[in-house]
């Protein structure tokens, strides 16, 4: 999708320098992917300590006989 954005040049340059990514497009894609990943992790953290009745045999799942 083509989109025109008005982004702060210094912020984009800093992101490119920090990540060693050479193109503006790639650095923006990477930033968006990271934002989505972190958001999903934050949503999963809501369930910490709330799921207690799982009967999972980790040794079987990991193929440990």
Image (cartoon, helix red, strand yellow):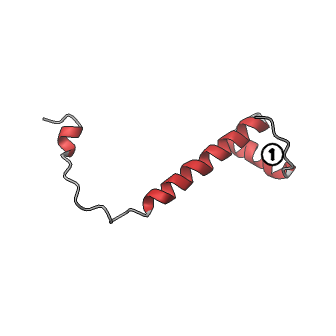
Residue at the (25%, 62%) spot, across then down = 52
Quick one: quadrant of the C terminus?
top left
Residue at the (85%, 42%) spot, across then down = 4
Residue 10: percent from left, percent from top: 84, 51
Q: Is residue 43 left or right of residue 24?
A: left
Residue at the (49%, 58%) spot, across then down = 43
Q: In this view, does 31 lie to the left or right of 57?
A: right
| Visible residue check, residue 3 | yes
Residue 3: percent from left, percent from top: 81, 40
Residue 61: percent from left, percent from top: 23, 39
Q: Name the residue under label 1.
A: 13
* In front of the other: 65 or 3: 3
Res. 63 image quadrant: top left
Quick one: quadrant of the N terminus?
top right
Residue 6: percent from left, percent from top: 87, 49
Q: Residue furthest front?
A: 1
Residue at the (78%, 38%) spot, across then down = 24
């Amino acid at each position: 999708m083509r989109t025109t954005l008005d982004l702060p040049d210094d912020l984009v340059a800093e992101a490119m320098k920090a990540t060693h990514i050479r193109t503006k497009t790639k650095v923006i894609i990477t930033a968006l992917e990271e934002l989505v990943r972190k958001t999903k992790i934050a949503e999963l953290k809501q369930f910490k300590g709330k799921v207690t009745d799982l009967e999972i045999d980790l040794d079987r799942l990991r193929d440990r006989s």
